[in-house]
Amino acid sequence: MRHIMVTGGAGFIGSNFVRYMLQNYPAYNIVVYDKLTYAGRLENLQDVAEAFEGRYAFVKGDICDADRVEQTIKQHRIDTLINFAAETHVDRSLVEPGSFIQTDVYGTYVLLEAARKFELERYHQISTDEVYGQVLDGRSTEADHLEPRSPYAASKASGDLMVLAYQESWNLPITITRGSNNIGPYQYPEKVVPLFTTNAIDDRPLPVYGDGKQMRDYQYVLDHCTGIDTVLHKGVLGEIYNVGTGSEITNIEMTKIILHTLGKSENLIQYVEDRPGHDRRYALDISKLCALGWNSTVPCEAAIEQTVHWYVANAWWWQPIKNGELYKAYYAQQYAQRLEKGAAVG
């Protein structure tokens, strides 16, 4: 594993992973392959491009473009492919499910075909705890049935099954990690923690879905990166590994931690209409990964606090996004009516 292609490497988790790997493995070369959709931004990697010139390269491309994928693998002598590329936001999947199927399912197929054709040493798939569906009791293990409840979760579950099928059919050397709710630097502010943080900084309402008692495992992104690293170097081929903190908090608790960290009033909280099929609880059993010698080091509350501090210190990154017409249109579509109804009820 010396020449690594990271698809979706200009996105949130991908860019953090690329930075982490280049910092920790001086012998590795990384090629980021990214379409640069709204959530994939070169700004996420500008320090990487400067600090690791010679070991880092960027290729703009769509994972659904087989010719471009194969050209990149050949040109950069890729031996390992790590797929972060995905449409990831549940709310968007409820409005436009087709793009999720195209990227998360067909795009995964294209990458698997390339990995098979060029006989890569490893194909690693980044997945999510949402493929298990809501878990009202206990914790999801890697052997559990998949019960996705949103188009996003279904598209990721489909990608996982395709990866496993290629391992069974052609003995492709694969591994899969299923992560919990990641938070941290460079997360596009449509996701709840950066959305609520930046809204609170600007003294705007924080639209909490339903009663706010949905439970999530909020994991700091660099904690997640160390888990992926462990699987890449110590994981068993053909296996799946859950990556999380092993604990959960409610969304309203998360919201109050953000407000407390910023010194803002809880009056900014506004309960709004819940989204369709909103999973009540996710909970991962992480014992399989811990057996490889890995442990989560950042509890949920600390992860939220560290994330808030990053957004406070990096307004240069998120303010242009939130002031852009594309983001404003999305926010109005997603929250305008909900906030208006919520205010009326209140």
Image (cartoon, helix red, strand yellow):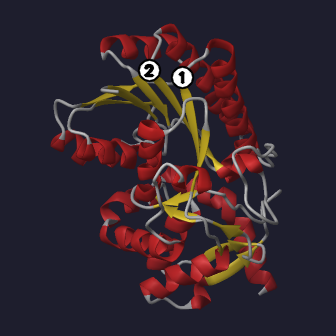
Three-letter code for the amino acid on which mark 2 is drawn: Glu
Residue 264: assigned label: none
Pick the quarter of the image with the C terminus. Answer: bottom right
The residue at 54%/72% (across/down) is 196
Q: Nearer the viewer, residue 301 or 57?
A: 301
In this image, 72 relative to 246: left or right? left
Disc on the earlier residue, 1 or 2: 2
- The residue located at (52%, 35%) in the rendering is 85
Is residue 197 at least partly visible in the picture? yes
Callouts 1 and 2 close, C-beta under 8 Å: yes
Q: Position of residue 253 (x, y in %)?
A: 62, 81
User: At 51% from the left edge and 8% from the top edge, which residue is drawn?
Assistant: 117
Q: Secondary structure at mark 1?
A: loop
Residue 209 drawn at (x, y percent): 73, 70
In the rendered view, does 87 fall on the left or right side of 317? right
- Looking at numbered disc 1 in the image, what kind of residue is underneath it? Pro
Cα–Cα gap, marks 1 and 2: 7 Å
Q: Residues within 10 Å of mark 1 (few under 14, many from 20)?
A: many
Q: In the drawing, does residue 90 fall left or right of residue 324? A: right
Circle 2 packing at 10 Å, graded few (<14), some (14-19), many (20+), is some
Q: Quadrant of the N terminus?
A: top left
Q: Residue at x 30, y 46 (%)?
A: 19
| Camera-nearest residue between 288 and 330 | 288
Q: Which residue is mark 1?
A: 173
Image quadrant assignment for residue 211:
bottom right
The percent coordinates of residue 126 (x first, y second) are: 55, 40
- Residue 328 lies in what quarter of the image? bottom right
Which residue is label 2 attached to?
121
Residue 262 in the image: above or below residue 59: below
Q: Is residue 202 visible?
A: no
